Image (cartoon, helix red, strand yellow):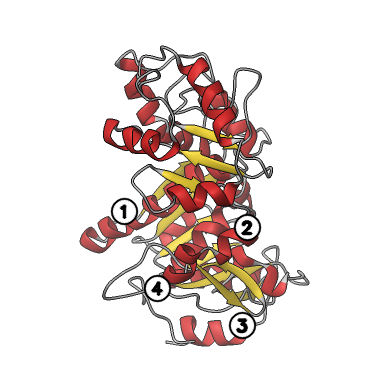
Amino acid sequence: MKAQGPLKGVKVVEFVGLGPAPFCAMMLSDMGADVVRIDRPGALGLGAADVLGRGRRSVALDLKSEAELEIALRLIASADILLEGYRPGVMERLGLGPDVALARNPALVYGRMTGWGQFGPLAHAAGHDLNYIALTGALGSIGDTDKPTIPLNLVGDFGGGAMYLGFGVLAAMHHARATGEGQVVDAAIVDGAASLMASQHQLAALGLWSRDRGTNLLDGAAHFYTVYECADGGFISVGPLEPEFYTLLCEKTGFDGGKWPADWSGKGWPEAKAELAALFKSQSRDHWCDLLEGSDACFAPVLDFEESATHPHMVERGVYVELDGVRQAAPAPRFSRTPGAIQGQAPTPGADHEAVLADWLDD
């Protein structure tokens, strides 16, 4: 399809990797950027199931070959942004480090995605999302009093990683276009995940956050901000933090808000939570949806993937789309003048070799 979106005309070279860097490249592609992925010769693609790889073109290069390394450098010379997600030092050993790349293209934004960062005692150690968010205090703050709860790999790889990489390379590109000066963007998951904890640091500074997990306003301890099980085994979420919303929840459910006010001090939370748990478990999830959904009681059912895709709100907004038989989230956020779009399914590695070289290098 013809590229569309606010990043139309932006050229991105992506050195194939795992997790957050491909997700960042997916987001840039969704917004219209021309993303060229450099794959290894003989690599096998995942086809339509490769959601993170959607919307790019692929060139297969043997970077140990001087001739093909030169092709990579010529692509870099034509790019606005480079994305790589290797351990520190790998790109340098390949002959593609920042010094070499910026010598070829002084306005290049060189985006580096790692877990621990480009420097520090742990920089060269292996790790994954869980380890990175463990070090930042994020993992230790999520869950009940028994043990931390693993929040998939959303907080590290994608929230603290890919999103900060995307923000960083676009900010650096703005600077490069104004000044002609490129630079390196060191996007470390430990940095991003720690940044995501800004609200908790603020609450702690105000004396409103305890280091004891499962005792705080936003970690499930409060009876008015948590998840409850229903009679049919389904779950619902309630979060009426404001007094008027809590009053409405109590009115609709018959819960005694006078006895158990939404007190942010923590007083009475365990007892009130036990009473609300018994109340919500007395009826099915559908019953509570019929009673509360769409009101200002700050309510939503807890859905799985399949249920989410068929929920009327999600359907009307077109949150999910189907591409070659694979359901996936549509591009986000939305733009009024330059809407993004999925530019196509993930490429077969190397399938676009000649077309990319013709487009990018035959000037």
**Residue at 33% in and 46% down:** 296
Give x and y (percent) for residue 26.
52, 64
Q: Earlier in the sequence, mark 2 or mark 1?
A: 1
Q: Which mark is residue 171?
A: 1
Discs 4, 2 touching: Cβ within 8 Å: no
Residue wearing tag 2? 305
**Label 2: which secondary element:** helix
**Label 4: which secondary element:** loop
Give x and y (percent) for residue 3.
43, 81
- The amino acid type found where label 3 is placed reads Asp
Q: CA distance from mark 4 to mark 2?
A: 23 Å
Residue wearing tag 4? 340
Which of 1/186 is in front? 1
Which of 10/26 is in front? 26
Answer yes or no: is residue 118 visible: no
Residue wearing tag 3? 352
- The amino acid type found where label 4 is placed reads Gly
**Residue at 34% in and 61% down:** 107
Select label 2 or label 1 by which is in front: 2
- The amino acid type found where label 2 is placed reads Phe
Q: Earlier in the sequence, mark 3 or mark 1?
A: 1
Give x and y (percent) for residue 216.
45, 20
Discs 2, 1 touching: Cβ within 8 Å: no
Discs 3, 2 touching: Cβ within 8 Å: no
Q: CA distance from mark 3 to mark 2?
A: 33 Å
**Label 1: which secondary element:** helix
Discs 3, 4 touching: Cβ within 8 Å: no
Select label 3 or label 2 by which is in front: 2
- The amino acid type found where label 1 is placed reads Ala
